Image (tube, rainbow, N blue to C red):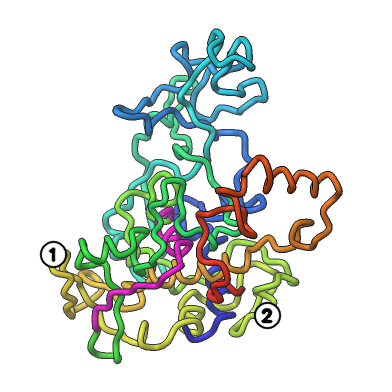
């Protein structure tokens, strides 16, 4: 790392910039905008597509109805009467008659069903990704005889990213590994199984593949997942090097207003907020060069990586290869967002400040006493699934 402030600024920009969404106008923050979580109620219903052994693409119950009796389907506006999704005649008796049941999930809408236009996979530097629409069942609706795609909805709801950097693993299923490999969510397993799971250093003429193993960075591992997910942010066939080529020459947050008092962007180590408040005066390439050591980007040659061996070789031009800073874009993305999320810490609650009410103190006594809640929910974050207490790597 070359500059911590630049790395945090890069992470905040990548987190909030809709340009990262491969033409889908979707950012990480699209689902993490409200105290780090998602509070939207329209088009937030997902059928049981993760049900095992076979997914269910039908919305609602057997009659395709929600709990309120309305017709279930894509782009549905959730109502209070739709909850709970498993209704009993007697809520105090789990063996009572089931009045309503569905395997649908209240979740988070993401990207429209699209595919990367083939010519855009090695697009000209500075050209945003070009995607085209594809059939997106079951996230389609018929209006006046015509079929329209809605945004796909994830099978799991968006958890808050506040304090997420303290989680030993991330994602609901824990697949975002504690060790960040610079390429994907899967840590050391990916390094051992995939010879292309490498980042690259260079002296300007000769690149060297490097297995990256950064511990206690599950937030970085997590960050590399959604940006390539066709449900969350990407059009199909997207790759990190192609996304890097698309973004590196773009002016940061160029279509989005920025407050002149923004705690990060008002104190940039390079550039500043653009006149009129739309975006910054610098490009993503400028921030990358300010944040990372030259060994991770100082090369103007194009290279191709053999998918079978991981061997990197020089090629003639951009039609068959990528620059080093494009090949390393996944590392920039994960490390920068991790650095930004390390600043998103809830450390001023009444519990943290020692200002809890008498009722809260009494509740804490039950929590840590006869209820034994702290058997699993101990420590300052009330979880045994967090990283080691006292780890100085988590200082903002």
Q: Position of residue 106 (x, y in %)?
A: 54, 33
Calculate the distance from the C-alpha at mark 2 to the C-alpha at mark 1. 44 Å
Residue occupying image coordinates x 27% and y 55%: 118
Report which quarter residue 48 is drawn in: top left
Q: Is residue 373 above or below residue 379?
A: above
- Front one among 67 and 299: 67
Residue 151 in the image: above or below residue 61 = below
Q: Residue at x 50, y 31 (%)?
A: 105
Q: Is residue 196 left or right of residue 125?
A: left
Which numbered marker is on residue 267?
2
Q: Position of residue 345 (x, y in %)?
A: 65, 63
**Residue stretch in magenta:** 208-226
Most foreground residue, 112 or 305:
305
Q: Which mark is residue 308?
A: 1
Q: Is residue 134 above or below residue 388?
A: above
Residue 227 horizontal/vertical position (percent): 42, 56
């Amino acid at each position: 790392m070359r500059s911590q402030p630049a790395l945090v600024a890069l992470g905040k920009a990548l987190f909030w910039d809709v340009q990262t969404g491969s033409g889908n106008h979707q950012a990480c923050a699209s689902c993490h905008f409200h105290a780090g979580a998602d509070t939207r109620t329209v088009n937030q219903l997902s059928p049981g597509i993760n049900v095992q052994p076979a997914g269910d693409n039908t919305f609602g119950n057997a009659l395709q109805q929600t709990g309120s009796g309305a017709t279930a389907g894509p782009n549905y506006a959730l109502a209070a009467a739709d909850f709970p999704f498993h209704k009993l005649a007697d809520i105090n008796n789990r063996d009572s008659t089931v009045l309503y049941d569905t395997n649908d999930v209240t979740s988070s809408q993401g990207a429209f069903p699209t595919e990367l236009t083939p010519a855009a996979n090695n697009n000209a530097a500075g050209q945003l990704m070009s995607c085209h629409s594809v059939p997106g069942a079951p996230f389609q609706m018929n209006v006046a005889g015509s079929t329209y795609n809605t945004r796909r909805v994830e099978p799991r709801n968006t958890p808050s990213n506040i304090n997420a950097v303290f989680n030993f693993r991330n994602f609901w299923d824990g697949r975002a590994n504690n060790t960040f490999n610079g390429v994907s969510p899967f840590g050391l397993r990916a390094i051992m199984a995939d010879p292309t799971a490498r980042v690259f250093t260079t002296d300007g003429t000769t690149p060297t593949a490097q297995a990256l193993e950064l511990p206690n960075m599950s937030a970085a591992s997590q960050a590399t997942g959604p940006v390539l997910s066709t449900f969350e942010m990407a059009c199909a066939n997207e790759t990190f090097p192609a996304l890097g080529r698309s973004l590196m020459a773009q002016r940061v947050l160029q279509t989005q207003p920025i407050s002149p008092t923004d705690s990060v962007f008002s104190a940039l180590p390079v550039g500043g907020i653009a006149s009129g408040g739309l975006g910054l005066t610098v490009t993503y390439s400028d921030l990358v060069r300010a944040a990372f050591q030259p060994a991770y980007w100082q090369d103007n040659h194009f290279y191709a990586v053999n998918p079978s061996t991981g061997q990197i070789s020089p090629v003639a031009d951009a039609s068959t290869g990528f620059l080093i800073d494009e090949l390393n874009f996944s590392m920039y993305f994960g490390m920068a967002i991790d650095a930004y999320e390390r600043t998103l810490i809830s450390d001023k609650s009444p519990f943290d400040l020692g200002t809890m009410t008498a009722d809260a103190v009494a509740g804490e006594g039950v929590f840590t006493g006869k209820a034994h809640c702290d058997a699993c929910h101990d420590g300052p974050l009330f979880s045994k699934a967090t990283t080691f207490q006292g780890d100085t790597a988590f200082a903002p």
